[in-house]
Image: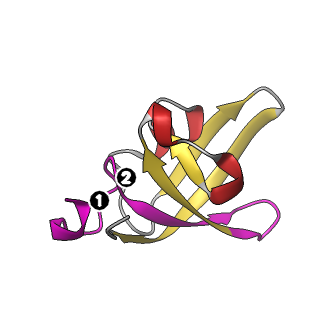
């Protein structure tokens, strides 16, 4: 039950508030399993490049993500754990 987790470290099940360092856009994603992933709903697979770059980081860290379109940087603005 992810609602029993706490802290500011990104782990599987975390909901993460991100700031795109290039565009200034903000987005919120939740790191989930493969069967639950739905990018339109902000649910990303834990093995995706973005999730792998975020896991283990903390609030205020910057994660560098290698994407097919190039490298992106996201600042972690918040981490929370919510029940689905």
The residue drawn where x is 64% and y is 58% is 41
Q: Quadrant of residue 82?
A: bottom left
Q: Quarter of the image containing the N terminus?
A: bottom left
Asked if residue 73 is positioned above or below residue 5 in the image, the reply reads above
Which of the two residues, 46 or 69, is positioned nearer the viewer here? 46
Do residues under tags 2 and 1 come within 8 Å of each other at their CB atoms?
yes
Q: Can you identify the residue that label 1 sits on?
A: 9
Residue 84 placement (x, y as % from top left): 38, 64
Mark 2 residue element: loop
Residue 50 placement (x, y as % from top left): 57, 41
The residue drawn where x is 44% and y is 37% is 46
In magenta stretch: residue 15: yes
Mark 1 residue element: loop
> Distance of mark 2 from mark 1, alpha carbons?
6 Å
In magenta stretch: residue 27: no
Q: Which residues are magenta?
A: 1-26
Which of the two residues, 71 or 11, is positioned nearer the viewer here? 11
Residue 5 placement (x, y as % from top left): 18, 65
The residue drawn where x is 37% and y is 58% is 14
Q: Is residue 44 left or right of residue 80?
A: right
């Amino acid at each position: 039950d992810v609602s029993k987790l706490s802290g500011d470290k990104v782990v599987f099940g975390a909901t993460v508030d991100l700031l795109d360092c290039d565009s200034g856009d903000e987005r919120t994603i939740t790191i989930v399993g493969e069967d639950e992933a739905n990018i339109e709903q902000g649910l990303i697979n834990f093995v995706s490049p973005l999730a792998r770059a975020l896991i283990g980081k903390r609030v205020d860290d910057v994660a560098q993500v290698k994407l097919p379109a190039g490298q992106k940087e996201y600042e972690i603005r918040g981490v929370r754990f919510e029940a689905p």
